[in-house]
Each structure stands twice: as structure tokens, then as C-alpha cells.
Amino acid sequence: MYVSLWAINLVCTLLLLPPSLLAAWSVARGSRQAVARHTRRNARLTLGALFVAGLLILLQGVTSALFLAYGRAFALPHLLVSFPPLLLTALVVVLLTLPRLWELARSPALEGQAHGDTMRHGAKPPALVVPVYGLPVAALVGAYTSIVPPTPTAAALLLTLWALAIVTLWWWHRRCWRADSRGGVAAGRVSRPGSQRLAVILSLVLALASALWFGQRASVLPPRTNMAAAMSADMTTAMLSHSGGIAVPALVGPVLDGPVRKFTLTADESALRLASGATVDAWAFNGSLPGPELRVVQGDTVEVTLLNHLAVGTTIHWHGVDVPNAMDGVAGVTQDAVPPGGQFVYRFRVDQAGTFWYHSHQEANEQVHRGLFGALVVLPRDTVEADDDLAIVAHTWGHTDRGPRFALGSADLLDRRAIRPGATVRLRLVNTDDDLRRFALSGTPFRLAAIDGTDLNAPDEVRDLTIAVPAGAKYDLTFTMPDGTVALTVADAPEAGLLLSVNGDGVPPTSASGPDLDITRYGHSAPTAIVPDSHFDRRYVLDLSQQPGFYDGRFGLLSTVNGQTFPQSPMLMVREGDLVKLTFHNAGFMDHPMHLHGHHWLVLSRDGQVPSGSPLWLDTIDVAPGETWEVAFRADNPGIWMDHCHTLWHAAGGMMLDIGYEGVTTPFDVGDGSGNHPD
Ligand code: C2O
Ligand code: CU
């Protein structure tokens, strides 16, 4: 719905350009002609073009106002920036130009006599032409701001430029017109501006070209950026005055006791096979697609040695586990990328039970796509496990000899498993893809027991609903195995799937077609430590959007937060103990699954609606186009933490920022010069 509105509004804005250019061209041509018949024809053409433009402006106004249904943040850029120049120009056209054009169109002889001389000279009454010339200018402003959502400064600059352009046009035409009216040689000199027009066009082209050139140069990222030093100046002062200050590598957490589970993960390049026989040109851990499943028990200390046998640097991030900052695995923020041949030991205690995953956080957009990830399952210490507990890691393998293959684990074809009827089953769905994945579980009622490693409160049994798992998220489904067959299928992936039955045989039951289970109305409410009217120590509003532009010298689709890209995006500062509220708006046309490291946030509201079901403590929220989400978290894990879109090519296109605790610094840098690229 929102995306259609967004598209209609954009299309109206773009479609406005041809008729407004046509009107400008024909009004200019019309008044230059001496022959009355031609003048009349041009006046009619102008009127026609203006009529079409008028309709489009009306439609643009209506669609701009309709954005109000999604909230002020969505409507204001349209109502305050794109639309006013159009509205104003249209009003002036109606008041000043239309009556004259109408006269010209109806009684050409009269007008021809009245203006015969001036028309031969080429000057036109400003009231006739300037408003019409203003139309394509306003349409350009509208089109530009619809494609590149302006920051307040950019909006002010643009509106000023627009006003200046109109005033200059008016001044110029009045000058010509006056000179022409006086007649004679002087007029010829002023209003014979063939070369002047060329000069104007040339300087506009030159201005545009140099703006592009400067934009491209300016977008080249510095070889090194230190995220802590990139904090705003007053924050740096606050940081320095903060006694001591602490660097990320010192944030290793408490002294660890309890059982230690040791693993070694070796990252290497290898050709590996999926179930269908398709060969993946993979970068994988321990030669396995996906990486080995790590299964530990709540309270265990996990010790993972990463050995890097790749030709490039890599790291491991523990997605959804609130580890101490030094163990977070973000290249350039919490560590240097482990160089080829190097190693790094991650050590942390897992206090949360649930489904998590691990993946590279160095050039993640490439390394995760190639296979550097796996599931991390933390079993609860003192509750009974399910009889059959399966981690289902969904991934689209891009680098295969048969084109992209979607698979659950390494099964890109139907995966058959034998499960005893009556057994309790837990399916841990992990979506490692860039886009939301829609799962259907058919053949049995089930519960959505947990999201992002946190159990939901009193989840109801459902059936026939689809489960939409955002990119990066983990959803646990539980059920008791019936006598028949149960199938897990995934929308748009007809070949892959999971079939459960007493002996693994049988045909899959028809899969549920939806609707999606709405997590904000599922399960039962329970008291939470944070509520919507808690006192928040910090509030940040984050506008997610996308626009064409230069990023690190290359032209493409930028993904921005508040109009900025990483590492220029501002670091959100917090102090240990703060209650922090974040508001996300997505006025664009793509989902942004926003993920926070080191913390789980509580969903306060989606589109102004407080969740009526179970409290939702998540690490990833899918902010769909037109949506507003409010989330809050307690700043209880000091460090510098990534908050980014888990559509990894969006993150690589700039949609990342850091949340920084006052007093925390990092010795690591991001950028080509440092070899660290967290995206
Ligand atoms: Cu799963 Cu910062 O990522
Ligand atoms: Cu995104």
C-alpha cells in the first residue's frame, strides 16, 4: 500500500517534466511568431500542456497529503519541499498566464496586432512566459527531492535556489520586454540573446558537471576512520573528562568460570556441494556448508579459535548474543580483521538460551554470501529440551555452477527426516539471507516459541499462518509430531523444504498460504522493565532511506540513516545505565531489517500501536516501507556497538551506524588504509 502510494507520487512527479517542458517550449515559440494563426496554435498547445501538467500537479498534491496517513515524518518532505514550488507556480500560471493565453488562443488577430511588433523582436511579456518557464523548474525540484530525500539544510538550499532562479528569470524577461517596448536598436542588443542563451545553457551544464565531479571526489572515504574519534566534538570532551576512559579490547567481560566449550573454526576457500550436487565456490568454516552448528548449554563459556586460511581478512560476529564488546567480532570497531594465516580467540559466557548465529563481520556483504556463517544454539540449562531439536539455516547460495540455489542448511532439495509421532519438535529458523523469508509449516498446529533468542510469553497454538522471518532474524517453532507428515516450505523456493514423517516418506501436505502471523499481536502480555512511558535518558530518531548517489567514489544506490552513510553517520552516544529509545522511520521503498549488536531492544510500538501480545525483546526489527517502529534498550553493556541494516548490501551501501558508550575508545580504524571493512 505504502509502496504504491510512494510509486504513484514519484511517477506523477516525473511525468510532470514532459508537459511542463512542452508548455515552456511552446509559449516561448508562440510569442516569437508574427503570424497570428501560428500564435493561436501555439497558445492552444501551451494550454493543452498546462492542462495535463495541472492534472499531474493535482495528483501529486493529493498523494503528498495521503502520506499523512503514515505520519508526519512521511508527509512533511512532500508537503514542505516537493509540492510548494509546484503549487505556487501553478497558482501564478492560473492568475497571470492563463487569461493571456486564453485571449491569444481565441482572438489571435487582436493579440497579433497588439503584440505584433514585440513578437517579431522576440521579447515576451514576463507575466505570459515566466510562470510557464517556472513550471519545469519546479518540476525538477519536485523530482529531485522525491528521488533524493533532502535533509532540512538541503531542502532550505534547494528552495532558495528555486526562488533565485524564478526571480532571475523574471528580472531578465522584464528587462528584455522593457527594452523591446522602447523599441529600436537598444532592444535589438538586449533581446537578441542567442549567444546569451547558449552561455546560460553552457554554464548550467558546467555547474552540473562540476557538482557531480565534486560529489564523486567528496564521497571517497578516508583511508582510515576511527569510529570513537568520529564522535561529535562535545562528546569527545565528555569522553575525555570521563575519568580514565576505556578501550574496546579491555571490555572482555567478567572472569569466566564454569564449563568451557572449545571449538576451532577454520575459514578457507573450497568448492563444496549442496544436496542437489550443485557446486558452491564457497568461503566456509571447516569446509562445511553452512559452518558447523555450535551447540552449547546456557552458562557455558564458549571458546572459539578462528584460524584464517583465506587470502583476505575475516572475523566472527555472534549475532544476537550479547557478548562483551571485545568479543563482538566487528572489523575496525572491536578488533582488526584477522589477517590471512592469523588467528583470534573469542571467549565469552552464554547466559541467554536460544537460537543465534555467527558470521563474518569483515566485508560481510561478500563473506556471508559466500558461506562464512553457521548456527549457534544455546540450550536452556534447566528446562527440558525438545525430543528433536533442529536448527534450520536458510540461505541463498549465489556462487554456484547452477545459478543461485536456496537451501535449508545444505539441502537445496526436499530434505526428508524421520521423526517419531508424539515427539516434541523444535525448529530453529535462521534467516541468513538479505531479504525477509516467508516460511509455512503445514500438517500440524504449532507455536512460535521464541524470537531472536528470547522465549515469547504464552504463545498460542496456530495453524495455516505463514511465518515471515526478517533478514538476520531467528524464529523458533515448536509442535508435537502428529501421525501424518509435516512440511516446512519457503515462499518462492519451491525446490527446497523439510519433510518430517515417521520414516521420512510421504508427500508434503499442501502448505499454508497465510496470512502472516503478526508478532505484535501474538502470545500474551506480561510486565516489562521498560514501558512506552518510561523516562528515557536518550531518544534518537533514525530516518532510513535510499537514494542514488556516490559512495566511496562509486555511483549507486546509497542506503542512508538521517541522510548519511557509514562511517560519516553520527555515533549515537549513550552513558552506561541509560534507558535509550530509538525511533525508526522508513519512508523508502525497501525493507530495512535493523539489527543492534550487544543488546536486545524491547518493541514499544509499531506504527503507534503498542504490541498487544507477548513482550518482544528482539535484536532485529524489520522496518517495512511506511512503517515507524519505536524500540528501547537499557545501555548495560559498555562498548561501541553496530546498529545496521541486515540486508547486507544496504549495510555495504552505507546503512550502518554505531552506538557508543561515553568513555569508550577504540584503537581500531575502518577504511582501506586499515584493511578493516565491517560491511
Ligand atoms: Cu548479523 Cu552486524 O550482524
Ligand atoms: Cu536496508
Image (cartoon, rainbow, N blue to C red):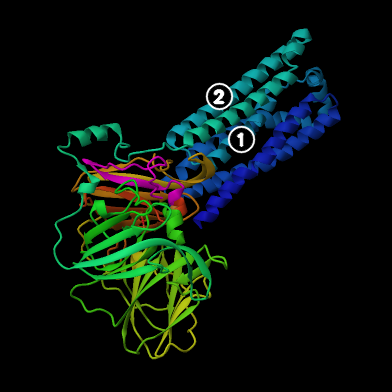
Split into quadrants, the picture shows ligand 1 in the one at: bottom left
Q: Is residue 342 in view from this perspective?
A: yes
**Image position, residue 487 (x, y; %):** 44, 81
Q: How would you classify the magenta stretch by its main secondary structure? A: loop
Residue 356 vertical placement versus 158 (above, below): below
Q: Are marks 2 and 1 in contact (CB under 8 Å)?
A: no
* Residue 426, quarter of the rendered image: bottom left
Q: Name the side, left or right, on which 291 lies relative to 45.
A: left
| Mark 1 close to ligand 2, CB under 8 Å | no
Q: Nearer the viewer, residue 10 or 367?
A: 367
Q: Name the side, left or right, on which 376 lies relative to 219.
A: left
> Which residue type carries mark 1?
Ala
> Which residue type carries mark 2?
Leu
Q: Name the side, left or right, on which 648 lies relative to 146.
A: left
Query: Which marked residue is nearer to the observer: mark 2 or mark 1?
Result: 2
**Image position, residue 144 (x, y; %):** 56, 39
Q: Is residue 512 in view from this perspective?
A: no
**Image position, residue 483 (x, y; %):** 38, 91
Q: Nearer the viewer, residue 428 or 106?
A: 428
**Image position, residue 642 (x, y; %):** 33, 50
Q: Which mark is residue 90?
A: 1
Who's the residue at 84% across and 23% down the image? 34
Task: Say which residue label 2 marks.
Answer: 164
Q: Which residues are magenta?
A: 651-679
Who's the residue at 38% across and 46% down the image? 676
Q: CA distance from mark 2 to mark 1?
A: 17 Å
Residue 674 vertical placement versus 444 (above, below): above
